[in-house]
Amino acid sequence: MALQRIVFMGTAPFAVPSLEKLAENGYPISAVVTGPDRPRGRGRQMSPTPVKAIAAARDIPVMQPESLRDQAFAGAVRSLEPDLVVIVAFRILPPEVFRIPRLGSINLHASLLPRYRGAAPINRAIMNGDVETGVTTFFLEESVDTGNILLQARTPILPDDDAGSLHDRLADVGAEIVLHTVRLIELGKAVPRPQDPSLASPAPKIFKEDCRVDWHAPAERVRNHIRGLSPSPAAFTTHGGKVLKLYRARIAPGSLPPGTVDVRKDALLVGTADDPLALEDLQQEGKKRMTVGEFLRGYRIFPGDRFE
């Protein structure tokens, strides 16, 4: 039976390829639900979410509820009589909303569920040193990220990936999986399978203190920590009371005590529990992100200094 009405829910850039993929393939999107306009960027000008910008360009009606538990919002979704709700990079949806569509509500998650249930699966996979991850579509249930799995796709985590590059690749892979999932549901060929809770692992939200670098950890773990938080929210350390954000580093030969700095021509090494790390991209407070060469030309730091 052909799908007549789809409601798409998403806010972040991760959701954009999925919305575009469904629209490009002719699926009838009755409305897009996204977050309210917020002050964004350096000028703090009121700006739409990335998903709203795409919807507006395609003349798709947009809903921007402040509260998803508002009965008026549930009523508005119900009035659309959706066959299916597709959710990508959105807030936690209450049952009275995700149970409205006759065929259910599906979600795209950036991990191979049941691994990395939670808000930060991309960051946590890289921070933990994983060499593979993927995406999963599943039917929404009340407990977060626990519903029956529909489709999955795997992708390697490359040695030079950071959270930004992996995010963009998974968004594109995810869009294809969302499209394929919707097609299977439309054809009545979707075969959901339950998750094995014994294989579940958490991917909790990243808070500021999660971003502080522990220089007493091994170099590979510190490097994974840095790239798993790059470009946002960014790992950080402190030097002389100033915060330095770290975006890219490589393991270098040598030996330095944990947190101790060695400064060479266009090179900044920091000791860990084993090998030093050579920092490659970083940012001091009030400045833009820069290469280590640019940083050293404008920042006073000396061999033997310490990062905390």
Image (spheres, helix red, strand yellow):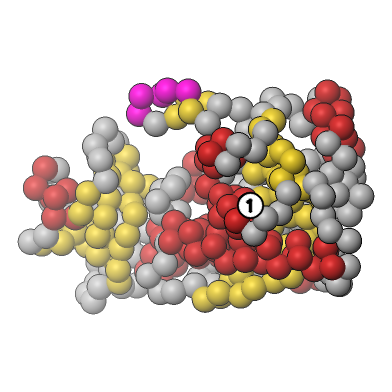
Residue 281 appearing in the image: yes
Q: Is 264 positioned to the left or the right of 141 in the image?
A: left
Q: Is 308 positioned to the left or the right of 68 in the image?
A: left
Q: Is 111 part of what is drawn in magenta?
A: no
Residue 33, percent from left and from top? 69, 37
* Residue type, label 1: Ala
Q: Quadrant location of the N terminus? A: bottom right
Q: Magenta stretch: dominant SS?
A: loop
Against 53, residue 65 (above or below) is: above
Residue 191, percent from left and from top? 86, 72
Residue 188, percent from left and from top? 88, 68
Against 53, residue 110 (above or below) is: below
Task: Name which quarter of the figure residue 219 lies in.
Answer: bottom left
Q: Is 54 positioned to the left or the right of 100 in the image?
A: left
Q: Nearer the viewer, residue 31 or 41?
A: 31
Residue 10, percent from left and from top? 65, 44
Query: Which residue is at 80% across, 46% downward?
Result: 5
Magenta stretch, residue numbers: 42-46
Q: Name the residue tied to disc 1.
A: 23
